[in-house]
Image (cartoon, rainbow, N blue to C red):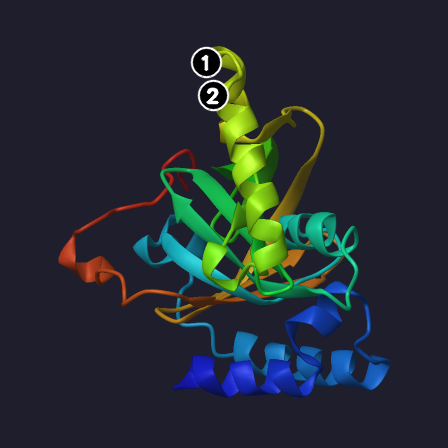
Amino acid sequence: MVSENYQFQFKDAGGFEALVNGKTTEMQRIDVNERIVGLERLNPTPRPTTSPFLEGRWNFEWFGDSSPGAFAARLLFERSPTTVAHFMGLDVLIKDGYTKLSSNLKFLNTIQSKFLLTTKLSVEGPVRMKEEYVEGLIEIPKISEETLPEQLKGLLGQTAGALQQLPTPIRDAVSEGLKLPLSGMFQRLFMISYLDEEILIIRDAAGAPDVLTRLEGPQPNPVDGAADAVISEYES
């Protein structure tokens, strides 16, 4: 499959963690970009912004510095000691004119932390879109008791007991995580340079690419009439 071939190429460039912490080399970056340009020449979707293929869940394989993916990944990764933290991945759900981006990190194979970012999409043309940040959410870390050292299980039980003693409104707010209102703080224009059933390539105003591969099965064929447009604000 084309997407699997590209995943191997990104791993050759140092993998996702190397991209997040800036350890990819200039040679690796130019090699990846050369392969991206080659794929873009074969773009089978002339109007990707209103294609039903756009909706669905996608996995980030590569991203530029201005990407929301870079923002979400580095928010977690740069604040964590690399010797004990493992970046588990970055994916995004595109649906009904919004994206919900999820960044996941695991500490000591026990504590999982997640940052969620919601953005709003609007169509600016056949290949151009505008993206606006809406809200961020830092979830309360999840702890796997199966892998937790015995000496820490007692502390975990005490902490859980203390949380149960809090007033219900406070306890509910804590359990939901920390919400970050981001409306009006950041927006960007980007163009979709490639889209098919498996791969999505986006370029920002500076030309930096984001490359995503689908995490689910193929979307309905546009000729089936399942959807005339994902986001219908633009009309030619």
Quarter the C terminus occupies: top left
The Cα–Cα distance between marks 1 and 2, rounded to whole angstroms, is 6 Å
Is label 1 in contact with label 2 (beta carbons under 8 Å)? yes
Per the image, the residue denoted by label 1 is 168
Label 2 sits on a secondary structure element that is helix
- The residue under the point 81% across, 68% down is 22
Whether residue 204 is visible? yes
State whether residue 101 is above or below residue 15: above
Give whichever of 198, 88 is nearer the camera. 88
On residue 172, the disc is 2
Nearest-to-viewer mark from 1 and 2: 1
- The residue under the point 45% across, 38% down is 98
| Residue 85 screen position, x and y as percent | 69, 63
- The residue under the point 57% across, 35% down is 158
Q: Determine the image quadrant of residue 183.
A: top right
Q: Residues within 10 Å of mark 2 (few under 14, many from 20)?
A: few
Q: Residues within 10 Å of mark 1 (few under 14, many from 20)?
A: few
Give whichever of 221, 62 is nearer the camera. 62
Q: Amino acid at mark 2?
A: Asp
